[in-house]
Amino acid sequence: MAEAEDLADAVAAENTPGNTLDTYAKSWRVWSRFCAATGLPELEVSRGALVAFVTWMLREGRQNGTGYAPASASTHLAAAVVGLRERGVTVSGDDQGAARAALEGLTVKRLQAGERRGRPTSLS
């Protein structure tokens, strides 16, 4: 059975485009920066840690101290969860769902306040 799992992992890795692997690596670095900034252990996760992660990403997560756009934060959250699971950490769907709900709520509040991040939708 273990050999079948190893084969499945090898096939998945071979079928994963290089840019996807780069995204996973970048997102793990973002998670690592968050853990270093907050003093949380990299390989322990909770609902609170994931909610704090998305909040941190929106406020100050980029290396220059500015926040990520909500779409980028969503991508980093998903990829960080994959990275945690690859490292043997159990991440519940409820915990990830709470982080997604927090991300959506914070995004709405920022839009209501007139803040825009990411690509402009028009040239006006």
Image (cartoon, rainbow, N blue to C red):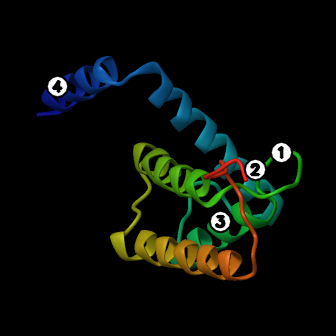
- The location of residue 61, given as percent across then percent down, is 76, 56
Q: Is mark 4 on a helix, strand or loop?
A: helix
Q: Is mark 1 on a helix, strand or loop?
A: loop
Type of the residue with mark 2: Arg
Q: Quadrant of residue 51?
A: bottom right
Q: Identify the residue position indicated by label 3 in the image.
A: 53
Q: Do the numbered discs 2 and 1 sit on residues whose CB atoms are within 8 Å? A: yes
Q: Looking at the image, is 96 positioned above or below residue 32?
A: below
Q: Earlier in the sequence, mark 1 or mark 3?
A: 3
Q: Earlier in the sequence, mark 2 or mark 3?
A: 2
Q: Earlier in the sequence, mark 4 or mark 2?
A: 4
- The location of residue 9, given as percent across then percent down, is 27, 28
At x 58% / y 33%, what residue is drawn? 25
Q: Distance between the residues labelled 1 and 4?
A: 40 Å
Type of the residue with mark 4: Glu
Q: Identify the residue position indicated by label 2 in the image.
A: 33
Q: Do the numbered discs 3 and 4 sit on residues whose CB atoms are within 8 Å? A: no
Name the front one of labels 4 and 2. 2
Of 121 and 28, nearer the camera is 121
Relative horizontal placement of residue 94, taking residue 38 as reference (left or right) = left
Relative horizontal placement of residue 116, taking residue 37 as reference (left or right) = left
Q: Earlier in the sequence, mark 3 or mark 4?
A: 4
Q: Distance between the residues labelled 1 and 3?
A: 14 Å
Relative horizontal placement of residue 33, taking residue 81 as reference (left or right) = right
At x 55% / y 28%, what residue is drawn? 22
Q: Distance between the residues labelled 4 and 2?
A: 34 Å
Relative horizontal placement of residue 80, taking residue 57 as reference (left or right) = left
